[in-house]
């Protein structure tokens, strides 16, 4: 079983920054891809960013490009999301996810709240 532990959420003013972390642990798991998703109140969960573990290739949703940066510390099985120039509409619960194959994400964290005040 894989456990994903997120941290780093909080309350920040618009224009500010936060860094989220997601640490993966467990027995004998493979890391193929990790990603960040978010869900705002009353809205569907949406993709934010993802990183391929083998070569660090990244993808982002358009609205966060140039503001958010996803990265990894492979030695610590940890993924980060540096969020700069935060906007009110970035307010959501942020979830990290892990895929051990090229298929769907199999494991999810518990979520961390990010609140941006306008």
Image: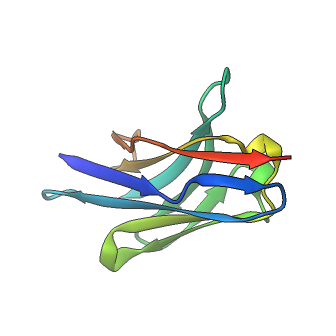
Q: Is residue 88 above or below residue 68?
A: above
Q: Is residue 69 above or below residue 105?
A: below
| Horizontal and vertical percent position of residue 48 | 63, 48
Q: Is residue 94 above or below residue 64?
A: above
Residue drawn at the location 66% of the way across and 26% of the way down: 41
Q: Image quadrant of residue 15?
A: bottom right
Residue extending farthest left: 27
Q: Image quadrant of residue 20?
A: bottom right
Which residue occupies the foreground of this view, 51 or 108? 108
| Horizontal and vertical percent position of residue 6 | 42, 54
Residue extending farthest top: 42
Q: Is residue 101 visible?
A: yes
Number of on-image labels: 0
| Horizontal and vertical percent position of residue 51 | 52, 61
Q: Could you tell whether 88 is left or right of 103 in the image?
A: right
Q: Could you tell whether 27 is left or right of 98 in the image?
A: left
| Horizontal and vertical percent position of residue 111 | 47, 42
Colouring: rainbow
Q: Is residue 31 visible?
A: no
Residue drawn at the location 37% of the way across and 49% of the way down: 99
Residue drawn at the location 33% of the way across and 50% of the way down: 101
Which residue occupies the foreground of this view, 8 or 101? 8
Q: Is residue 102 above or below residue 65?
A: above
Q: Could you tell whether 49 is left or right of 25 in the image?
A: right
Residue drawn at the location 79% of the way across and 56% of the way down: 13
Q: Could you tell whether 39 is left or right of 104 in the image?
A: right
């Amino acid at each position: 079983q894989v456990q994903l532990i997120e941290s780093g959420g909080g309350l920040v003013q618009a224009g500010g920054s936060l860094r989220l972390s997601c640490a993966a642990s467990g027995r004998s798991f493979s890391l193929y891809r990790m990603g960040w998703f978010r869900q705002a109140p009353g809205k569907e969960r949406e993709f934010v960013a993802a990183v391929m573990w083998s070569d660090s290739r990244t993808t982002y949703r358009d609205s966060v490009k140039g503001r958010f940066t996803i990265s990894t510390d492979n030695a610590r099985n940890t993924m980060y999301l540096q969020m700069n120039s935060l906007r009110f509409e970035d307010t959501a619960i942020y979830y990290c996810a892990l895929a051990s194959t090229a298929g769907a994400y199999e494991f999810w964290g518990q979520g961390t709240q990010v609140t941006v005040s306008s």
